[in-house]
Image: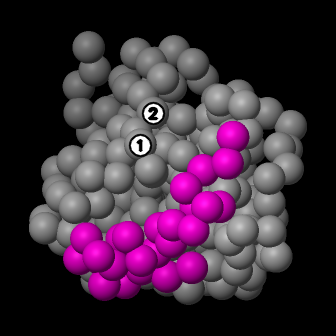
Amino acid sequence: MNATAKVAVDRRAFIAKLLQATPDALVVTGLGSPSYDVFAAGDRDHNFYLWGAMGGSTSLGLGLALAQPSKSVVVITGDGEQLMGIGSLGTIGVKQPKNLTIVVLDNGHFGETGMQRSHSSLGTSLTAVAKGFGIADAFTVERLDECAQVAQRINARQGVTFAQVLIGSDEPQRMLPPRDGVFVKNRFRAALGFSTF
């Protein structure tokens, strides 16, 4: 049993505080609950919600961070998705974009596929994995007030950050963001000053 059974940061409160403290950040959400949490905190043009792309959020975030080096990029994903795209952490460790922060909401379960226990509740430390891939600033968040440390790193843009946030396995009411992928893409591009198509 990992620490998620002992501590539980309120996921919605954490995300709301984080986004309030980082209003200019470009946000990429992982599949499912992280998208609901980000949308519940307030929809904005700089949010890129992923639908049906499990495992792809950190790779997308890396590409965005490399393409937009003057902007803070935040990936908000879950432990299940991060496990599916675990190799992306290796590439992030090699590329080391100074403006990328990865926030993993870890409830120790695959929440979108039936709440099966994930590796993180069976002994795997995602923080240790991130460090093993070369992300030196990797740490575990166990309290809501630690949100300020994550926000400070996002705004500073001084190196890759990986924050494993230990949350409970409860499921807040779903708040569904736009599901039209073309709309989300075009809105995001327009917010960055690019043409849409």
Percent x, y for residue 154?
A: 43, 73
Task: Judge depth for marks 2 and 1 and give the one in front.
Answer: 1
Which residue is under mark 1? Answer: 84
Foreground: 13 or 185? Answer: 13
Which residue is under mark 2? Answer: 54
Residue displayed at 38% across by 70% down: 129
Percent x, y for residue 131?
A: 33, 78
Q: Quadrant of residue 10?
A: bottom right
53 left or right, relative to 77 = left
Q: Is residue 28 visible?
A: no
Quarter the N terminus occupies = bottom right
152 is within the stretch colored magenta = no
Furthest residue in direction left, as rendered = 94
The residue type indicated by label 1 comes to Met
11 left or right, relative to 44 = right
Q: Disc 2 or 1, which lies upstream in sequence? A: 2
The region drawn magenta spans: 116-140
Q: Are marks 2 and 1 in contact (CB under 8 Å)?
A: yes
Q: CA distance from mark 2 to mark 1?
A: 7 Å
